[in-house]
Image: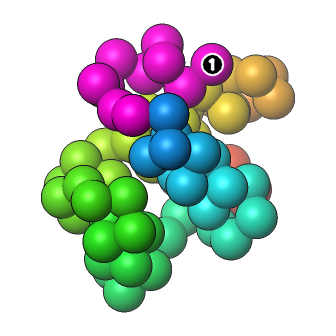
Amino acid sequence: MASDIGMQLAEDQIKVLEENFTKVTKHPDETTLMLIAAECGLSEEDTAKWFRLRNAQWRQAEGLPAELGSVKD
């Protein structure tokens, strides 16, 4: 599922990202983002991008508008 986000990530990176997305937060603050990025070995920018794309996917799957900020999850 995460592979259709369009970023080339290793399976273990996706696993960490997905785990944080489902168990920690869908909207990581700067500190959390930094920790997740370090854990995955990704830049904070790439990690933030992944979360944006993943959130859009999640909202679509939930039948919500895809724009950020339209619905608080």
Q: Residue furthest bottom?
A: 31
Residue at position x 76%, y 64% in the image: 23
Is any part of residue 63 visible from this angle? yes
Color scheme of the displayed model:
rainbow
- Residue numbers of the magenta segment: 1-10
Q: Residue furthest top?
A: 4
Question: Residue under circle 1?
Answer: 1
Where's the C terminus, which quadrant?
Answer: bottom right
- Looking at the picture, which amino acid does disc 1 mark? Met
Height in image: 46 above or below 4?
below
Residue at position x 59%, y 45% in the image: 15
Left or right: residue 57 versus residue 8 is right
Where's the N terminus, which quadrant?
Answer: top right
Height in image: 29 above or below 68?
below
Left or right: residue 46 versus residue 18 is left
Residue at position x 52%, y 51% in the image: 17
Tell me, yes or no, whether the highlighted magenta stretch contains residue 51. no
Spot occupied by residue 47 in the image (x, y as percentages of width and height): 33, 53
Spot occupied by residue 21 in the image (x, y as percentages of width and height): 63, 55
Height in image: 67 above or below 15?
above
Crowd tier of the residue under label 1, counting other residues whose Cα lies within 10 Å: few below 14, some 14–19, many 20 or above? few
